[in-house]
Image (spheres, grey):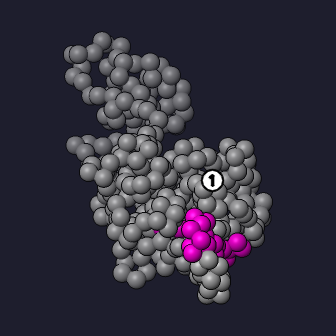
Amino acid sequence: MDIQEIKRAYEWSLLRMANVVGVMTGYKRKDGVKTQDMSIILMVEKKVHEEELKKRDVVPPSIEDAITDVIEVGRLRALSIDKKARHRPCPMGTSGGHYLVTAGTNGELLRDRKAGKICIGTNNHVGANSNDAQIGDPYLQPAPYDGGTVQNDTIGHLLRFVPMTFALDPSECGAARLWSGIYNVPAKAFGRKTRLRPVVVEPEYNLVDASMIEVDSDDVLPSIVDIGVPKGIRKATLDMLVQKSGRTTCRTVDGEIIGVDATVGPISYGGRSAYFRDQLIIGREGFSAGGDSGSLILDKEGYAVGKLFAGSEVQNTTIANPIQTYLDLLDAELYLG
């Protein structure tokens, strides 16, 4: 038998030995240096002296014609993290938000095209409090809803955001301001408490919900939890299957892009509403939920295609900005480490 056949024949009995957590074939190491000798390698939680083991649990120097080796690997466990906890350095796909919001997701790392600064990419409503923030405001990881505080958990500061237009925002139209002012004169003269106020009834369409947070590169990691480092960007297409990793629903896969040119609205922003054009629609129940806003959406090969910012109440529709539009309007590029 060759060495792999020997390993397969004996692997179950080897796994039953005390302290052994794995069996494989590979090059034997001597004093930490790899040799050219193929061996059956036993992975153990901790190396112990032979006298501390029962005779049946001592690894033999060879099995049939195959030499053996032992490496210490510790206890094996599924690799996962608490996405709502504090992390330094912090991977993407975790909890984050402006100090006055509830919670969102740290989507990906960006590089500012103007000055080369490393930033966390997220939504305007996550990182810039839906236009109400000031440049330089603290950004927390974890987000306030998950226990983050300005004193202990500030990971960065707002560098830039793309302003959004909301329906019923005050109008800057000169004619509307003039006429409302004229009609308010008699109202004031007669002591009335009601005034006319010009507002935007049909707002301009938004293209993105986007902000970027300047951070120290030592405090962040470019990898996205359960996905890894993005490979680059691609244009989304109909029927494309996508994935994401967010604060609330963690990694979800096999979302299907069912629209690439959607005009949507009104989208509720806590008392205000906005309209968007040229958006991606992902159809899959449970693909996203509240708190996942800001997540990067990637195809199955790991290329970024969109930026998640909204969804439906029944949780079977997710809405995202196209990735290139998002990057261009932020004047940023995807940072791959």
Q: Residues within 10 Å of mark 1 (few under 14, many from 20)?
A: many
Which residue is labeled 1 in the image?
A: 243
Residue at the image point whose x is 65% and y is 87% from the top: 175
Q: Position of residue 134 (x, y in %)?
A: 39, 69
Residue at the image point whose x is 26% and y is 42% from the top: 30
Q: Quadrant of the N terminus?
A: top right
Judge from the rendering whether residue 52 lies leftward or rightward of residue 299; answer left or right: left
Residue 179 seen in the current view: yes
In the foreground, 274 or 197? 197
Is 129 above or below relative to 175?
above
The segment highlighted magenta reads 187-211
Q: Look at the numbered disc 1 and give the secondary structure of its residue.
A: strand
Judge from the rendering whether residue 245 lies leftward or rightward of residue 318; answer left or right: left
Q: Main secondary structure of the magenta part?
A: loop
Q: Name the kind of residue labelled 1 in the image.
A: Gln
Q: Position of residue 337 (x, y in %)?
A: 40, 66
Q: Is residue 45 magenta?
A: no
